[in-house]
Image (tube, helix red, strand yellow):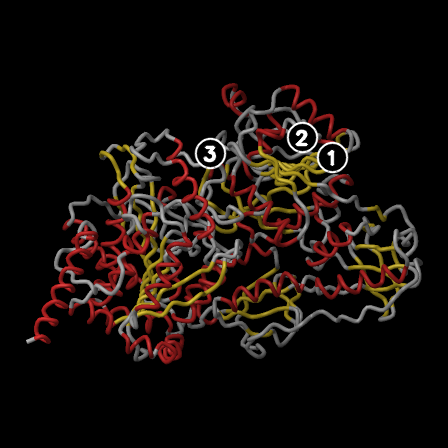
Amino acid sequence: MKKAITTIIVLVAILFSVHVNAEKTDYFFAPEIIFDSEIPTPEEFLGYEIGSRITEHSRINAYYEKLAELSDRTSLIEIGQTHEKRRLYVLIVSSPENIRDLDKYKEVRKKVRQGEKPDSPLVVFLGNAVHGNEISSSEAALLSAYYYVAAQNDFVKKQLEEGIYFIDPVRNPDGQERFASWVNSNASVNSYNISRFDREHTEGWPRGRGNHYWFDLNRDWVNIVHPESKSRVAFYQDWLPHVQADHHEMGANSTFFFEPTDPDGNESRFVPQSTYQLNRLFADYYARALDKIGSFYYTKESYDNKNPNFGSTYPDYNGGVGILFEQGSSRGLQQESENGIVTLPFTVRNQLVTSIATVEAAIAHRDALFDLQKEFFTPRRGKEAAKSYIIGDSYDLSRLHKFIQLLLDHRLEVYENANDIIIDSIRYEKGKSFIIPAGQPNSALVGIIFDDIKDYEDPSKLGYGAGFSVAYSTGLSYGITTSSSRGARVQILPQVYAGSLQPSEYAYLVDYRDSKSQQLLFRLLEKDILVKSAFRPFSINTDKGEKDFSYGSLLIPVKNQSIASSGLYAVLKELGEQEKIDIIPVSTGYNVKGADLGSNTFKRIEKPKVLVVTGGDISSLEAGEVWHLFDQQLKYELVRVDSDVFRRVPLLEFNRIVFVTGNYSFLNDSDIDNLKSWVRNGGVLITLNGASRWAISNKIVSAGFVERPDTAAQKRDRGVSSRSFERFATSIFQTKINLEHPLAFGLTNEKLPVVRESTLFLAPSSNAVSVYTDDPLLNGYISSAHLEKLKGSASILAYNSGRGSVVLFAENPLFRGIWDGTGRTFVNAVLFGNNISGRFRE
């Protein structure tokens, strides 16, 4: 009897706990869902109701740690860390049996690349908050984790048996924490600030969308510039999920978007039609889920489904189904909109029910998803599949190996080039070039990385971008071959650094054609080492024979340094090993060809003291790209000055100033005169993209436009450079650069691809360093009217002014942190901007 009473008390307690949990979560979950009382709800763990404040990334991680501690349905793994050292967690949820066999299934999934159907559960990746200020999905990730860990219904248990589900709660923790701090510190305690103009909804610069360096991580899946992307792509490629959900937010006046996107322009020619068919089949599940809770939505009208850098599209190029979700955002706790007041709990619920519907749809179409991967990874046949891409560089193996490593990170097949090959007058040397077959198992990703399409029939359907080729971004030479002669498959790149520096009592030389020489040079300047640059080619005898040196080669004299020769040798030996670049000792200044080492054609390199303007209405993306370049690649000090502080800065403390696209109306006539005077006294002003229009409109230089703006536009340009010209879909164009000009030092091919998104056309002049060719479009789209203006226009202009200079880029040479070819010209502007001269060769 006593035992029976005890059992009844326990059952009542369990039922009461289930009821309490249900009361706290009944807004988000269907009433029939039964939860395990031993698993705390997010509200119980956090101490507040979901939607009443923004949950910081650290608290989300803590809740996931608690779930992993309490449940055998989970495995919590740390896939990496952000720039700010926040842990990137992925919670794996499945049946206890599947969790125990994760290693086995991870190994089995390798068969996918062989065109086989592995005997494994479905794999679904639920991704959230890649834009840090789009937090309804990261809040929903708390609830979806609770759902799959705690739900006791038989149909949920069956789903866990049939699939392995990855929940990535916050793909951009650094930005999400920035946004959470803003909202939580600006939200009122006893009322809601629903006005879109309230501080709660108007976060300060640089806002939470980007990561630590203000980059958009939803443009980084193929580029893999940042640690968040590197970790996530490695994890993705280990498992090759069948489905990836990518949850976002949009403007408050919109409802909810899910795929399919507009089929008349957003379907890639590289992606199987069966992928898009599954998109349409999944849509039925999302419609039913949202209909059930009375939420409005739309499909098929917008959004880009071709760009492989998106989290919703990268899966399409890897044999999976990627799905984009966009929720009209409260950008805080509550906000007024055309659809009434949008609340955070409402947006969280929409993200949650579509996450659950993704799992339901995947299970319902299990066979089709396995068939899709088999179809996708079965090597193609035919003429297109028989060709291969060959890419190489005889001098810049650092840049070449960086690109090849990117291909290897995407698990693509790369082979050594077994023989010297000449294609279109370009010599691809054995050991300094690689072959990438077009017809390999993942031909779609190869195709988009080497994309050359430029014949879009309906430009109105282009979306955000039209040119996606990563190969062009390298600035390396590449061609197409049908030769079957190739060497061994590349698994690990060979070491190219010789590492045998011998001391010299005369001088040391560095070949500037290797891109790592730029990092080395900054290290030397940082240590106040005297370095000169060759403004003419030369040849000299070394201990390894005669060697040719090109424009920009570095000369480091032993004498007249601030340290003794032994100290200089120690510094050079350390830096050469650190940067993995060869430094060549010489014992004579008498050259075999060209100017001798004592010639005035060797010019001393000035130590840059660099400032970039930030804040206000300055592009955080472009400013972040400058910051990232200096901090992560060059590892050199950069001073970031907000626009409201710039007028108080003593400019003479700097000799380089960078303006990116933005609003410079904070500068009055007197400020502009001071800037001009600073240039005349030896400063170098570097303007990118829209800032170049501002510089011309405010007569910093006497450059012109191909078509001058009207009076109203001129007036507007005085303050705003970011919105004074039309934007078109991201595309790639061919320019021709003067290899003798200091801004081109290190480059060996006068053909230099650039990326652009604006209709800023700079008039050519004798100050042009680089101009667009007569047939400039390489990849993407441009209208016939814009094409005529672009032909022959200037890409880079360089002007002397007194003892200083102004360098104007018509584009953004640091676009997304991956444009290495044009990035070299920007770094050269920083290094050699005070020594520009010479005109463009006709």
Q: Which one is earlier in the sequence, the residue at label 3 or at label 1?
A: 1
- Quadrant, the C terminus: top right
Badge 3, how many Cα within 10 Å: few under 14, some, many 20+?
Answer: few
Could you tell me residue 779's position as x and y percent? 49, 51
Q: Secondary structure at mark 1?
A: helix
Q: Is residue 35 above or below residue 27?
A: below
Marks 1 and 3: in contact by CB < 8 Å? no
What residue lies at 80% left-to-right and 61% top-to-bottom? Answer: 572
Q: Which mark is residue 653?
A: 1
Q: Check whether the beta carbons of the residues at disc 2 and disc 3 lie within 8 A of each other.
A: no
Mark nearer the viewer, 2 or 3 = 2
Q: Are marks 1 and 2 in contact (CB under 8 Å)?
A: yes
Q: How many marks?
A: 3
- What residue is shown with label 2? 649
Q: Which mark is residue 336?
A: none
Q: Quadrant of residue 112?
A: bottom left
Disc 1: CA contacts within 10 A as few (<14), some (14-19) or many (>=20):
few
User: Where's residue 388, x and y in %?
Assistant: 51, 69
Look at label 2 and name its amino acid: Val
| Amino acid identity at mark 3 | Glu
As helix, strand or loop, the secondary structure at mark 2 comes to loop
Q: Amino acid at mark 1?
A: Glu
Residues 794 and 68: in front is: 68
The image shows residue 370 at horizontal and vertical percentages of: 29, 72
The residue where tag 3 is placed is 726
Rounded to the nearest angstrom, the CA distance separating label 1 from label 2 is 8 Å
